[in-house]
Image: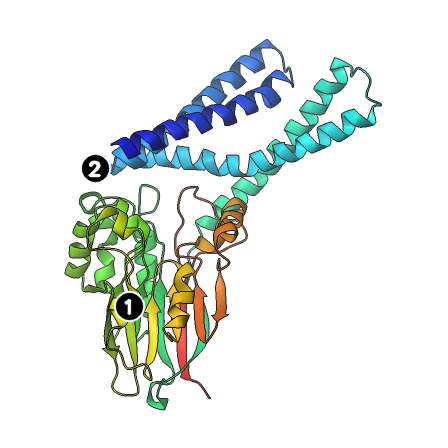
Amino acid sequence: MLRAAAYLLGAIAITALVHGYLHRRLIRDTDLGPAWSRRARLATAGAAALLPAGMAGLLMMREAPRSVASPLMWCCFGWVGMLLFLLPFMLAGEAVRAWVLRAGGGGPVQPERRRALSRVIGAVSGVATLGLGASAAVVAQLPPIARRIRIPLPGLGAAMSGYRIVQISDVHVSATIGRALVEAIVASANALEPHLVAITGDLVDGSVKELAPLVASLAHLRARDGVYFVTGNHEYLSGVAEWLEHLGSLGVRVLRNERVAIGRDDGFDLIGVDDPSGSDWVAGHGLDLPAAIAGRDPSRASILLAHRPDGVRQAARHGIGLQISGHTHGGQMPVGWALERLVQPYVFGLYQVGKTALYVTSGAGYWGPPMRFATRAEIALFELVPTT
């Protein structure tokens, strides 16, 4: 409860600062008259209330009926997404404001000129935000594309050439993502006729009780060598023990710091590790790659399922041929892309780290704002071939 209270207080503080700034620049400085200013203040207050309400919903409404949680989260996250576009424009407007006022010679600035400048900056920021936010919202609702990647895998036998793995990641079934997307993902995956399906975490944001009916179609995934799952950080926020048991009932095998042999001597080891955050939530959980590969024949081909890409250097030190990850959503929004780049360099696509290939998917869903900017949701199809 202390952690939840701290998050909620933080959300309230950030909300107050952000909306106080918007009130000053978009309402007080533009001086649209008493009637319009009153309406704008009411709208700003309502928008400000959405953020802590949404945070409270994330932390304390895991068991809430979807009919209650869904409208709240759509409104909350929709406004958060708009803010992620609006605030950069407004901050850029500060630089424009300073330049224009400085160009006036440094003398007193007429109130009319200052007000006109505020109105222009506010109008341009608002129109740009509406346009970009609306287009990003449309892109987020498009079905995931199937991205095909050909991977030369060291140690793979010739008989396994053309082996197909479908990766599904970061669906985030929740108050804003439901049954229809899961069913579309399952249909797309089955159409690719994979030999194996790998689900690399962050499948859900909510309890088994609330979301189990929405993920039921996962039981219809078809792959000759099975469907495998590793935890993401969001499973640990959603009741991980119940989810791991439920996924087993759907025919999904969970890999927790362990490996399975796929194929015969010319096949590969499929290795799955917990998300590193697991150790903060559940005793005995957390990433442990050495335990997963203990006793492994290093000459045999290997594929690592790990929710986060930033552990790839450890994988490279242990001679892993391919790591498949998610977590980043391909950036999802410009701010998200920048934040990911600050902490680690692997945001989307195929990388080579030493002798280890790393693929980071943009994910099949989204988290938070129901928006995607300059990135599409996807499921990835890997076609394995031996190295030459």
- Number of marks drawn: 2
Give the percent coordinates (x, y) of residue 123: 65, 29
- Judging from the image, what secondary structure is the residue with disc 2 in? loop
Which of the 4 image quadrants contains residue 94? top right
Q: Residue at x 32, y 73 (%)?
A: 194
Give the percent coordinates (x, y) of residue 282: 21, 49
Q: Residue at x 59, y 20 (%)?
A: 24
Res 157 label: none
**Where does label 2 land, which residue?**
63
Q: Is residue 255 above or below residue 142?
A: below
**For this view, does 139 lie left or right of residue 9?**
right
Q: Is residue 48 above or below residue 235?
A: above
The residue type indicated by label 2 comes to Glu
Specify few, some or many for label 1: CA neighbours under 10 Å numbering under 14, 14-19, or 20 or more.
Answer: some
Q: Residue at x 21, y 37 (%)?
A: 63
The residue type indicated by label 1 comes to Pro
Mark found first going from the N terminus, 1 or 2: 2
- Name the residue nearer the viewer: 174 or 316: 316
Give the percent coordinates (x, y) of residue 290: 28, 68
- Name the residue nearer the viewer: 161 or 142: 161
Give the percent coordinates (x, y) of residue 273: 28, 63
**Where does label 1 land, which residue?**
290
**Looking at the image, can residue 221 be seen?**
no
- Name the residue nearer the viewer: 356 or 305: 356
**For this view, does 315 lie left or right of residue 22?**
left
